[in-house]
Image (cartoon, grey):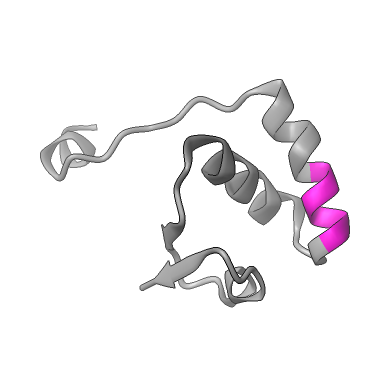
């Protein structure tokens, strides 16, 4: 956690609503459930960029993948 703190990142809690939204996103966008959980959490928190090498996020026009 020291490395996370050192660069100013935070860990967001997962909510039941995130899981519900992820199910819908997974089905509508054709994403793996794991990716859809990240996307649902990002949406709730107003985050539009993700550091990932997972090209599946490129399917989502509102998300900028950086990495």
Residue 56 among magenta residues: no
- The answer to whether residue 9 is left or right of residue 15 is left
- The answer to whether residue 27 is left or right of residue 47 is right
Q: Provide the residue span drawn in magenta.
A: 23-28
Residue depicted at x 56% and y 36%: 44
Determine the main secondary structure of the stretch shown in magenta: helix
Image-quadrant location for residue 17: top right
Residue extending furthest toward the right: 27
Image-quadrant location for residue 11: top left
Q: Is residue 59 above or below residue 34?
A: below
- In x, y percent, where is residue 20? 80, 33
Quarter of the image where the N terminus is located = top left
Residue nearest the observer in this picture, 1 or 14 = 14
- In x, y percent, where is residue 51? 39, 62
Q: Is residue 31 above or below residue 38?
A: below
Residue nearest the observer in this picture, 23 or 61 = 61
- The answer to whether residue 33 is left or right of residue 4 is right
Residue depicted at x 46% and y 68%: 64
Quarter of the image where the C terminus is located = bottom left
Image-quadrant location for residue 29: bottom right
């Amino acid at each position: 956690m020291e490395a996370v703190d050192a660069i100013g990142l935070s860990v967001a809690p997962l909510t039941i609503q995130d899981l519900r939204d992820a199910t819908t996103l997974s089905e509508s966008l054709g994403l793996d459930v794991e990716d859809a959980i990240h996307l649902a959490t990002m949406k709730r928190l107003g985050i539009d960029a993700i550091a990932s090498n997972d090209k599946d996020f490129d399917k989502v026009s509102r998300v900028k993948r950086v990495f």
